[in-house]
Amino acid sequence: MTVAVVLFTADLRLYDHPPLHAALREADEVVPLFVRDPAVHAAGFDAPNRAAFLADCLADLDSSLRRRGGRLVVRSGPVDREVRAVAAACGATEVHMAAGVTGFAHRREERLRRALGADGVGLRVHDAVVTAVAPGAVAPTGSDHFAVFTPYSRRWSGQSLRRPLPAPRAVRVPDGVRGEEPPSRAGLPHLSPQLAEGGETAGRARFARWARADLSRYGERHDDLAGDATSRLSPYLHFGALSPVELIHRARERGGPGAEAFERQLCWRDFHHQVLAARPEASVRDYRTRHDRWRGEEEAAGDIAAWREGRTGYPLVDAGMRQLRAEGWMHNRARLVTASFLTKTLYVDWRIGARYFLGLLVDGDIVNNQLNWQWVAGTGTDSRPHRVLNPVRQGRRYDPDGVYVRRWIPELAGLGAETVHEPWRLPAERRAVLGYPEPLVGLAEGLARFRQARGRG
């Protein structure tokens, strides 16, 4: 009787799961394993919203496995110690897992390889599980990665994707492998009150609903702040509850410009993964252009606090920040505007904003969060690093009637479209009763400071 272990990490699903598929094909019994590694806590990756979503994902995965005759084995402790102990207890000869791209993931794989190798157990790491195209699978001549999105997307689009794998019909788990109950979100403190439900079942249902209602018009509506027509699938992709390969195939089956626009967003996700896989230090250091004159926590304490609380006096910025606190998620257009305001209007170090987002975002991961912040800050892969997003113009363009702003800023609920993005234009006596702050800084003043700091003024 042969046994294999499948270590789940950022791939918490049964549909289209190459490591599980390979283990079931090659072994008589399989141990589906998830390890609650204290190193994740030490690295600050288990913010409350993500811990709650993770608990949902694990409970759903365990339930799905039990319907197929199996179960999820959950252990707590250093991942190399626990995987080695489980492999020894069940007599496994091989451990399967998905490849990661962060420095943390690479170090975990190396520890596992050493620990398992000491016992003669093999470690098989599978590519294109977390991403659609594996990092490094496409690269320009003379470099290990693409630094610009457009040429990457051309090569990425020409890749032949594997067909999605079905969920297994049965999973046979050997007796006697000890585990603990999957965690629960119940009792977790400081959760966003409107946090979404996690898990593969919820993710697949969400995609099905959204694809029927909004996919065909995604290209024209994904920036519509009031319409809220984005897929909201990013948390499920972050935890691997949905497969990017399967989503691309299902979008292509429907076809049309909406499907193409959606696929482009998944391409952006893979683009960032291949950048960080090649340059893991970009999670904390400027990727392309160094800027050493950022304002920090001490110098800009008041401005940073107002930005975090959604009290900058710029309605679109504040609406986005309040949505983040309420949902643990923010519309992508609002993410761009709030990040641009912090880094270019307030000229605050992008790392401060990235840390705050990671503390609340349910989809917050080192890859997309850090590299998107660098893109906006002008230190990353943006080919126009000096662009500044004007929150008033962005509001008029993407929330012309002010619906999104009024949804998240009740102080402005009584304002019409003509003033909701510029309440400071109201008479002083009217502003006084709103209870909404005056702008932290004039946009022209912020732009002048940014240009001077960047040597362009």
Image: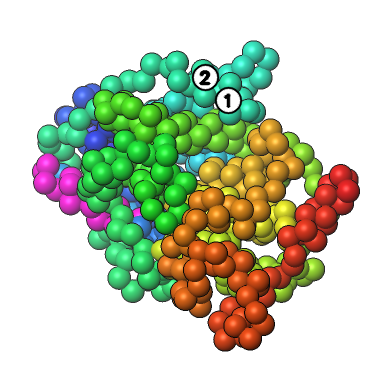
Q: Amino acid at mark 2?
A: Arg
Residue 162 location, x and y as percent?
33, 20
Q: Residue at x 25, y 56 (%)?
A: 59
Left or right: residue 238 versus residue 162 is: right
Can see residue 15? yes
Can see residue 175? no
- Where 218 falls versus 79 (above or below)? above
* Residue assigned mark 2: 154
Of residues 41 and 55, the one drawn nearer to the viewer in this rendering: 55
> Does 115 appear in magenta?
no
Residue 17 location, x and y as percent?
29, 33
**Mark 2 and mark 1: span between their CA atoms?**
6 Å
Q: What stretch of residues is rendered in magenta?
A: 54-69
Query: Is the Cβ of the residue at disc 2 closer than 8 Å to that at disc 1?
Result: yes
Left or right: residue 402 versus residue 289 is: left
Residue 160 location, x and y as percent?
38, 16
